[in-house]
Structures are given as structure tokens and as C-alpha cells.
Image (spheres, coloured by chain):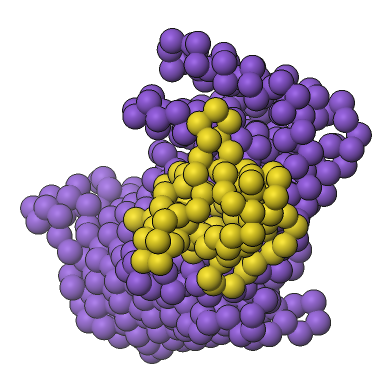
Chain colours: A yellow, B purple
Amino acid sequence: MACKLKRRQSDGVFVGDAGVKVRVDVQSEEPAALVQLIYAGELDGTAPFEFTIRKGRQKLLIAAAGVDSDQLMKIVELSGSDACHLRNFFWSTTHFHTTLDVEGK
Amino acid sequence: MRTLLSLALVGLLAPAAATADQLPRRAVLHLALYEKDKDRAELLNAVGTDIFTDYLVDRALDEHPDRVELSEIRSDLQLGALTGRTGSTSIVARPGISEFLSAALESGAVTRKTDDTSMTLNVNALLFGQVLRGEIPRGCGSLDDACRQGAGRWLRGLSGSATFAVGDSGATVAGASADTAAVIVDDNQLKALTLRYELLVRERNAAKAQAALEDARKALQTQAGAFLTTQLALETRIQNAMDAGWKDETLKLLDAEPSAAGRAAVLLRRFQSLRATVDASTEMTQLRTEAFKTYREYVVAQNKLLAEKLYRKALTVDYIHERPSGQPALEQVRLVFSTPLGRKLEDGFEVRAPKGALTMNAGVSFFDPQVTAEDGWKVRDTQVSAALDWTPKQTGTLRATFTLAYYFQYMVANGAIKFDKTAITPGGAAIPLPKAAVELLNTKGDIHVAQFRVGIPAAQGVSFPLAVTYASRTELLKANKGFWQGHAGISYDLGALKQLLLRK
């Protein structure tokens, strides 16, 4: 299965088809956990963390937990058994969330 | 005393309280990744709304000093004397160290029958490191990564302490045998100097840590939801400001800049200009205030959980230079280990500190070679001890900690007392000694000590330890019977000093 979000190089926005469900997670060499996400005002705190792409531009915010300062995490889109890398994210106890701009076509 | 110390230190450290406007850490890291791989995605990450709000958070942390100290949820701090041979209220050393400054006044030694009173000052090396770097000496707060990255991560574990005698400088020592008169021997105002390194034994087992994070994740849902909701509102509004030309212009400038340092400088200037826009907008200022409030609530909850789950076990190495009353100097090396008991969260959302803790010490003391030159570094005694702490649920305004402890010391070598020619008997007769002298006493064998202790917290950072101890004998007298001894003290964890500094 192909991943549904592609990053636009001009402005960094992730683009996908409206109405499609997307599952995301964090990956890291050190232990890490996705705590909760919010997309278009809707929270999801239970795995599988997913949202449905809306038409137009919305923000996806992801809060994570880790163990090391400056811990490098990767936000990934899960598609079947595949994991597509969306963006890097440095986690610390004071900066623990990251934001993706998602645009639905 | 606390006020005086606080005021004195505020005066000393105030020149270091300047802060610099700088790029947020994550912006620096993304730019570094860009320099390494030339992956444009990292430039795009560096100009994201999340990274710009990092910048706003850093500025807000400078302006809002209220922080929750990890020490508030730790009951394993050793604030008093690190040796039991002088004024002390505990026969078992705790592994934790002050994350800033601490002071304690204590009376009653462990292996000597005495009413010695001592004053102990303890300072964390992290504080000095911050002063030397020209930063606010804020120690290690839960809203601060200074103790979890770079040199601070290692400095955080290092501390030094000095214990001084308070009151009379002379000490009465019983004679070596029943027919020998008691004498007053020389005494030292400086009783002990200690270097301590705390190894934060984090649960490096990845599976365990992952399981702990999963528990933390569930417990953080409420705070995460509140934070993400307010943060989304803020970042959406900031995005509008970025889209009005700021982002395109910033990317153009970053692309055109040939050097890494230049790119960092450009980004900082662009963040500063966008901040001016945010500050000028009443709507964005309001959104920022709400987001920062939920941010703090999340960080406090998160760090308590992470501290509970990842930072609680401790292993400490102590080096102690002791100068006990009337005895030659001793050097001691000791290991201190502590583990909390009952760390599981009792419900999904409320964080509760562990109710119990087990602490163990093992140490060995040496005579300084200058005392027994023919023997070199001769072992004097070895010690092992253990303490079981129980902190029941708070009743009223108090949450006392009760401790049962056992201490065993084996005197490998005979003890020694030191005289000089100024030594006099209590009656006033001088002892005719040509020079300083050391007399060896027949003291080899076991010493058993048991203690019951209550630690009563008072105001923030202030605690009153009270204890009663039974010892089977003293260090320097083998023949006498066991004895009871009372201990009392007061300790100050001077974390509040940080608040004074940060408000400046």
C-alpha cells in the first residue's frame, strides 16, 4: 500500500486526498511513545492514531514522550506494514510536540 | 539564616543573570541536520510554527520563573552531614543531592556519644557551571533542560559539601581505660569535606523504558489534550502571520545565505521580527498566554511522571575527608544505592510519589598515612547500613517520613586519639606532651547501631529530622555498654533562592 501524504518542497506542506484516512506514529532508536494528536481540532489519544484528511489546509499537532534530551524521532505514516518517513522531530522534556501542515485536495 | 544566605547569594550572583535572545534548541538541531545532509526538508522544519513557538516558549520561560523542581517529589535527598562521626541525624546516607544549594544544622553523632552540633553546606556543580557560562544559576528545574543535556547532564550529578562544628571547639574524650582520666583534645571546626557523584541510574532497559512511557502516555492524556487544543489555536493564528510573506521571505534568505552561521543569524533575526508581530497583536498575545498555561501544566505532569519512572533509582559514590573530634583525619569511600518501593501509579491521572524507599550504604575508612606512616593507607573500619523509609498518605498539612535503619561497623584496626601539648584535663591540668601524639586504643570489633527517625517537612524546602539511636558501643571504647542517643536537626533546601534569582 502506498502512503497518502507527500511533502511539497516549496513550503513543506504535506498534501493528500481529502477523505482518506491516515495513520501516524513516532519511531525512534530510544524508547518513544506518541501521546496524543490533534487534527482540525479533533483529538486522538488512542492507537492507532489516525485522522481523515479534510479539504483545504489544516494543522496536525503531535505530542510525544521520550527518554533523552534532543532525542531524534521520526514522524511516520503507517500504511499496511510500511512506514513512510514524514519528518524529523527532536524531542525534549521542554519541547515535546511537533506540527505538520496537511492540505487536502 | 536562610534569608541571609539568600540575600548574600543574590548579591553575588546577580551579574550573571543576563539572558541572551537565541535560537531555540530545535532550530539549531534542524539547521545542523541541513548542514550535514543538505536536505531542504530540514530548512522547512526550522521555519515551522512549532519551532517558532519553541522560540516564544523559551522567551516566556525567561519571564515566568515558576517551575516545579524534581526535588519536590524526591524524598531521598541527603541534605545533612555525609558522615555519622560528627553532628548527624541519620545513620544511613541518602543518594540524592541538592539540585541547587542546601544547608542543615544537626546534633548527635552516630558512633560516638556526643552532643556535637554541625552545620553542613551542600552545593551542586551545575550551579557553578551555569554561573561560569554567564547564565542564570537556576540549577535543574523541570522546565529546564540544563541538567539533561551537554555538560550539565554530568555536572548535575556532582556536588560538594562541607561540614563545620558549631559551638564549642574542644571535645571531651573518655580515657582509654577505666583508670585514665578524660581529657580535652584538639578539635577541628571543619569536620568533613565531601565530593559526591550521583549516577542517575536510568532504566536503560529499552523494553522497560518503553513500558514506562506507555504508562506515562495514558496518564498524560488530559494535559496533552488541553495543551494541543490551545497550541493548535496559537499555531493556526501564527501560520496566518507567516503566510503573509514571512515564510517565503525567510526561506529565500536562508537559501541565499552561504554559511551555516549566517543561516542561524538570519533565522534568529526573522524569529525576532515575527515575535514583534505576535507581541503587537492582542489576539495572538491572548492565545499565547493560554497556550503557555497549558504547556506548563503538561510539562509539570510529564516531568513528574518521567522522574517517577526513569530517574528514581540512584547510585552514588562518595569520597569523604573526615576530621572527627580528637581523632586523626580519616578518608572514606562509600557507595550509596536507593530504590523506591511501590512506584506504580495508583490511578490513571493522579501522580503519587512512591511511599517507600530502600537505601543501602557500603563504605570503607582509611587512616591518613601521616597518622600511621609506617602502615601507609591502613584500613580503619568498614561499614554497611540499610534504611527503610515509609511516607504514608498526607494527614492534615503534614506528610512525614518514618525511617527504620540499621548500621554495622567493623573496626578492622585499633582506633586512635590525638593529643597535642595544649590538651588539658577537665580539671585544668596540662598533659606534658612534647609534641602532638597519637595513642592507639583497643577498639577492634563490631559496632551495631539501630535508629528510628522521623522527617517532618515544614515550610517549602524546610524539614525537621528527629531521631533516636541505640548503639552497642562507641568507636573508641570497646568495654562500655550500649547507649541511647537523641538527634535533632533542621535542613534547608535552598530551591527558593532560585525564585529570587529568576525574578530579578
- Counting the numbered discs, the total is 0
Residue at screen point 35% across, 85% down: B448
Q: Percent x, y for residue B189?
A: 48, 48
Depicted B246 relative to depicted B47: above or below: above
Depth check: give the residue in front, B331 or A15.
A15
Depth check: give the residue in front, A20 or B66.
A20
Q: Percent x, y for residue A59?
A: 67, 48
User: Which quadrant holds the N terminus of chain A?
Assistant: bottom left
Depth check: give the residue in front, B413 or B406.
B406
Q: Residue furthest right?
A: B282
Q: Percent x, y for residue A45?
A: 62, 69
Depth check: give the residue in front, A70 or B5.
A70
Residue at screen point 53% across, 17% down: B254
Let me know if residue B450 appears in the view. Answer: yes
Q: Percent x, y for residue B412?
A: 18, 73
Q: Is residue B421 left or right of residue A3?
A: left
Residue at screen point 84% across, 37% down: B284
Q: Quadrant of residue A28?
A: bottom left
Let me know if residue B427 appears in the view. Answer: no
Q: Is residue B435 left or right of residue A5?
A: left
Q: Quadrant of residue B275?
A: top right
Residue at screen point 79% across, 77% down: B397
Depicted B69 relative to depicted B180: above or below: above
